[in-house]
Image: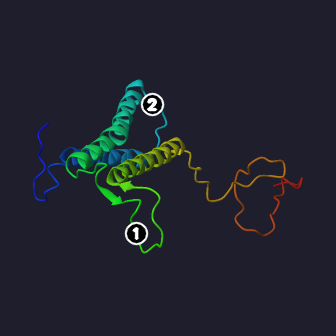
Amino acid sequence: MPNLIPDWLPWMRPAGRLIWAVAILIVGLALVGYFFKRPKPDRPATWAECMAGAVGVFGLMTLAYAVIPHEWITFSDKYLQWDTTKFVFRSNQKMLFFPWNWPFNFDKHVVRDIIVTVIYGVFFGGNLAAFAAWQKRGSEPAVEAAEKPRTSRFGRPLRRLRASSGPVTVSASANGGEA
């Protein structure tokens, strides 16, 4: 795979695949955000649309859960050389002005694994939030009419509204007289 990342900073070329994977994931998430903004269609999805969506979700999940953590581990092992021989602190070392010795060693290999765990946690939380939001898409309550139509005392809708709220005049034919 050709590395097209410029060498402006010394770490950019060794982290090339990690940078590309993150860039592709960001573009994919931007597409997902675009599809979230579109209203849910009235017709059911076709088989081809469902398959395209499934392939897209599989690709994004492969990037998020496999490629990016793997490339981070590779970058930290090969370029940063974070292994079990480089320590953040040792068990016999006083650190951070605390008056006791730490009961364990904390090496950079553990820091690398903590970062990978945080990557998994962020993607898993985002994944759950995106799936829940996708299922609720289109279920927003419909905007109700400005005014509910008035009904008669029998529950039927009135045919026309009164012009004023004053008393209603009754015509002569309704009164039994001649009009």
Q: Residue at x 37, y 45 (%)?
A: 32
- Which percent across, then down, holds residue 142? 58, 50
Q: Residue at x 21, y 46 (%)?
A: 78
- Name the residue that disc number 1 marks: 95
Residue 45, which numbered label? 2
Quarter of the view holding residue 2: top left
Q: Nearer the viewer, residue 89 or 119?
A: 89
Q: Is residue 65 left or right of residue 138?
A: left
What label does residue 118 carry, if any? none
Q: Answer with left or right where residue 9 lies relative to residue 18.
A: left
Question: Could you say where residue 126 lies in the image, as x and y percent from the top left?
Answer: 45, 48
Measured as percent of width and height from the top left, residue 108 is found at 32, 54
Q: Residue at x 16, y 48 (%)?
A: 14
- Helix, strand or loop for disc 2: loop
Q: CA distance from mark 2 to mark 1?
A: 59 Å
**Is residue 25 rendered to the left or right of residue 118?**
left
Colour style of the rendered protein structure? rainbow
Disc 1 element: loop
Q: Amino acid at mark 2?
A: Ala
